[in-house]
Image (cartoon, rainbow, N blue to C red):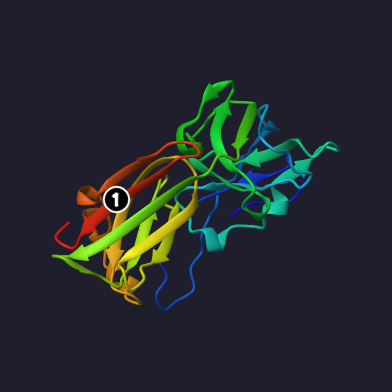
Amino acid sequence: AGGRGIPGTLVWGRVVFSNVDRNAEVRLPLQPGTVVEGRIVIPEGVHSSKVSPGIAIRPQAIGLATQPPVESFLQWNEDQRGFRIAISPFASQLEVTPFAGEHYVREYRWNGAPLPGGAIPAGSSARSLEIVLDDKFSTLNVTVTDGSRPVLIDVFAIGSPTSTQISAGTGADGRATFPRLAPGTYRLIAIPKGQQALLDPAGVFDRLLTTAPRVTLTPGGTQSIEVRMSD
């Protein structure tokens, strides 16, 4: 549960319970959130946008559909670069959606230090957050083959955190193109078209990730990789 209000008045509580066929009483201890002063950083040479990105900080252990609206966490300054945002005392995940895909997040800085993947540890006492944007997207070309034959299939490029998933379908030549990926390391999973539900059973997705082909993309670069069905 999250209490609504301006940043600084937000309180959080979390409890796990099950209820089958009768009424239940649940006690939910509340803890105060933390207010963080943040800023969007656009380095020299990166085109600027007057439209602010979407920003949310959500608890990692709770599904996104259960969260209060982003607006209950965030207040922008007049310059649309600085903001105040409230976070829970639990382990949290930063989510940033640049406007119209104009930028990607190059780096998160938490109290001036790198924050890999935007993962905020529980009980953090940090008071400053910088989100560094960039516009030097990478291109990835993937060819999927079964022996010597091209394959019509859906390819998923999975970044870090694993919630970063982009899909593209191959054509008759077995090729799929991802034209605007943020630089970084991705793992590739190929699934028969329309059968993404194959990933739903517990543990299947994680097992595939352990052996999935990896590719590392550099800023502004183009890379091609072939994935064989035996992979």
Residue in the picture at 33% in, 49% down: 224
Q: Nearer the viewer, residue 183 or 198?
A: 183
Q: How crowded is mark 1: few (under 14 residues within 10 Å), some or many (20 or more)?
A: some
In the picture, residue 204 is in which quadrant? bottom left
In the image, is 101 to the left or to the right of 172? Answer: right
- The answer to whether residue 98 of the structure is visible from this angle is yes
Q: Which of 197 and 62 is in front in this view?
A: 197
Q: Nearer the viewer, residue 161 or 149?
A: 149
What residue is pinned by disc 1?
225
Looking at the picture, how far across and down is residue 67, in whole percent? 59, 58
Quadrant holding the C terminus: bottom left
Residue in the picture at 44% in, 56% down: 178
- The answer to whether residue 17 of the structure is visible from this angle is no
Looking at the picture, how far across and down is residue 5, in whole percent? 76, 49
Looking at the picture, how far across and down is residue 163, in whole percent? 44, 53
Residue type for callout 1: Ile
Is 18 drawn above or below residue 60 in the view shown? below
